[in-house]
Amino acid sequence: MINRTLRAFSFIFLIVFLVGINEAFAQESANHLVISQVCFNNNQVNKSWIEVYNPTDNILVLEKLRISNLKTVNVLPESIQKEGGISIGAGEYVVICADENSFISSYGSEVKSVGINALSHLSLGGFIAVTTKKSGEAKGAVVRYGKKEMSSKITELAGDQVVDFSEEGKSFIRKVVKTQTGITVSDFSESIAEPGKSNN
């Protein structure tokens, strides 16, 4: 009787322990921002933008934005860098755009947007990456665009997919799903541009 009770207790303890480990890993892996939608317009460069999404339950800070063809490590404006980055609430979006007035004119002011002129200087191909404070860069936080060979060195982090330039009113979007084991992101697919709309 005692042995049976001890075995039952040990089994229950093991299950609770394993569930606890699984939840800890899920919390650790679900800790970064994701580039969820992009519009790289090489005909009207001032209309380029990227949508950054926070799929977690906590406020996250976009600390750095890198564009491969620029030598500078962080293209966020100096004023934003001094503040420590851009805070993005749980389940919220921010759009980084080449020209804020142009973005608001096209999509309205309901979505938080930040104008960064460096986005109007995209090359024929490369990558864009966002760094989450205390987390760094992760899969889903990097997007390759344009000519494939110009971003081949980062396939391990960004994957094989390379996003093309978009026409007016179009974008590339990917689903972002938070699961018990972390964040999963699909490949990008062409869509009607709807920044700030849920795509999970």
Image (spheres, helix red, strand yellow):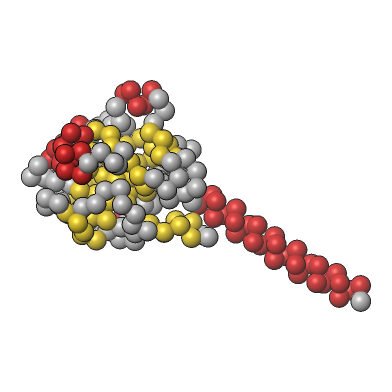
Q: Quadrant of residue 80?
A: top left
Q: Where is residue 69 in the image (x, y as percent from the top left)?
A: 21, 38
**Image: 122 above or below 174:** above
> Camera-side residue: 149 or 102?
102
Q: Where is residue 79 in the image (x, y as percent from the top left)?
A: 33, 23
The residue under the point 66% across, 62% down is: 18
Q: Quadrant of the N terminus?
A: bottom right
The residue under the point 86% across, 75% down is: 4
The residue under the point 11% across, 45% down is: 42
Q: Position of residue 182 (x, y in %)?
A: 49, 56
Q: In which quarter of the image is the C terminus?
A: bottom left
> Camera-side residue: 133 or 83?
83
How many numbered marks have been drawn onto this rendered protein structure? 0
Q: Where is residue 123 in the image (x, y as percent from the top left)?
A: 15, 41
The residue under the point 20% across, 38% down is: 104
Q: In this view, does 4 lie to the left or right of 185?
A: right
